[in-house]
Amino acid sequence: MNQNVRKRREIEDYLATIQFLSEGTNDTFFVWDIKTGQIYFSEDVYEKYPLPFHGGEGNTLQECEAIVFERDREQFMSQMKLIADGKEESVNMQFRLVEKEGNKQWVTCRGKSRMDGQYDPVWMLGRISSGELRQKVDLLTGLFNVDKFMEDMQMCHDRGASGYLMILGIDNLKNINIKYGREYGNYVLKKVTENLEEVITSAGNIYRLDGDCFAIMLPNAEQEKVAELYGVIRKNVADYCTVSAGSAFCSPSCNEDCSLIYQYAEDALDRAKKEGKNMLRFFSRDSYEKRLNTLRLQEELAQSVQDGCEGFYLCYQPFINNHDFSLWGCEALLRYASPSRGKMSPVEFIPLLEDTELICPVGEWVLQRALEQCREWRKWMPNFHVNVNVSYVQLRKEGICERVLELLRRSGLPGSALSLEVTESMQLEDYQYFNDIFFRWKMAGINIAIDDFGTGYSSLGYLKSIVADEVKIDRCFVTDIQRGSYDYKLLGNVIELAHSAEIKVCCEGVEKEEELMVLQELEPDVIQGYLFGKPCEKEEFETQYVR
Ligand code: C2E
Ligand code: CA
Ligand code: CA
């Protein structure tokens, strides 16, 4: 039999087979005659894709390339070339085909070649399937979704690949949606997608994660390359939005599983957002550990609060009258004995309590304890006075005004036994709201003290807007006051001004005799500091100062 005839028969056999196969599934089958370059498809392909039909003849590789989405063509052609050159015997690739209506559709294409001898490929038999990836594509952007991302990450990891993972987030997408409507939000997502596809040239390495985030896998990339890519993306999308990104390195020697790498990149993204958005941050082990540590402490604190503020206790620091150095009262200062890390300073845990609003129940607990203590000590010192710190988070909480008054009433103490310290640095922008609360407290006899005075930015103006009875001048103005004339003058003016408005002045943080000597010339009313006593627990305070 003539060789050509034999070949024709073979082709017809193949065609019958692929036609038969394709009728049982939604997939498309093909035979590639590598020697002639002709590719024969099962007929369904011509209904779906704009591939020229030559009446039973095959199509050229170039005709096929034309229905592959532009961005994926390079990868498609290079894989086909590997087969044609006999360098690979099988392919398993993913690319997008453009349908007749212009829609892009992700497909998987698997195929295996038949060799003549060892290196001479003759045929390839293949199957193109769109069903497999349908569940893994994000409908809005046409990118792969988070499921596919996790799979691919795992695959890269198993293959021992290394490179960077970048998670890119659109800044303030929620606000964009609210301001301009969801339609526009979607438009921004699509625009960012387009831009990403332009910049990240290897197909299928971009994924849309939930909401406003994209993942980009950058195999073999260097850190500088990642930063450069981010810079280009940021510039290209600038007309629509700003973007933040976090990136983490992943290599087989990292020994971490891929969900952890994802977490690392997300952590870096969180940091980029926290630090002001519109920037790229690389994962840092240190800040990650710190955050984990914080989260654990937060959990511990929450548990303690749930257990009736177990582990919290108060220390008391004396206040001294400046004119005769007699004891005026104390400031109640919160402490925490953590089950895992022992005694902790409030500077470490109060911000965490504030972040989670746990400061509200804890603050009430402090107030109640401090009032109880004050009442007990009043048995020895009838005019004993207690200062309690109130966080701005507590002040913002509805009902705070009444709850404080209720706790005072239950303690049986007169309001004049209590000062509530609020910090100036809390930027009380809503003076009216706070003044209403302070005013009602003052009606009950409670003193309002402004803490850390001088550290905020509006110190003096502030005195006019807030109904305060007392200011506590921050330690930084007091430290080494004997050395500088500027601080001395400033402090003198502040004290004079306060006094002229009948506001009492307390100087915090007096540690040295020299400081005290100079301060006395300025005549503050009350002094607090290590020189007179450090904060100490109830028993010690009692024996040292009360009895
Ligand atoms: P603060 O209200 O300014 O309290 C004074 C802090 O200065 C205390 O630190 C005290 O120990 C320290 N101090 C007093 N005299 C001296 C001194 O002479 N030298 C030095 N170097 N330090 C001195 P502490 O107890 O660590 O408290 C830190 C901060 O934690 C407090 O600053 C306050 O803002 C906050 N805090 C403490 N207890 C509570 C609380 O019950 N509720 C709220 N919301 N905040 C609290
Ligand atoms: Ca204070
Ligand atoms: Ca203070």
Image (cartoon, rainbow, N blue to C red):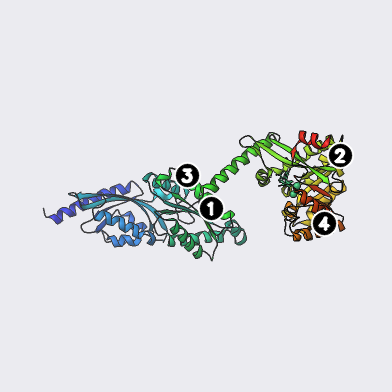
What residue type is disc 4 on?
Ile
Q: CA distance from mark 2 to mark 1?
A: 51 Å
Between 333 and 193, the residue placed more toward the observer is 333
Left or right placement of residue 210 versus residue 16 in this view? right
Q: Earlier in the sequence, mark 2 or mark 4?
A: 2
> Which circle, 2 or 4, is nearer the viewer?
4
Residue at numbered disc 3:
259
Residue at numbered disc 2:
413
What residue type is disc 2 on?
Leu
Residue sitting at 65 percent across and 39 percent down? Answer: 301
Task: Give the x, y percent position of residue 354.
Answer: 68, 46
Label 1: which secondary element: helix
Up-down relation of residue 334 to residue 432 (above or below): above
Disc 1 crowd rating (10 Å Cα; few below 14, some 14-19, many 20+) is many
Residue at numbered disc 1:
269
Label 4: which secondary element: helix
> Which circle, 2 or 1, is nearer the viewer?
2
Label 3: which secondary element: helix
Q: Earlier in the sequence, mark 1 or mark 3?
A: 3
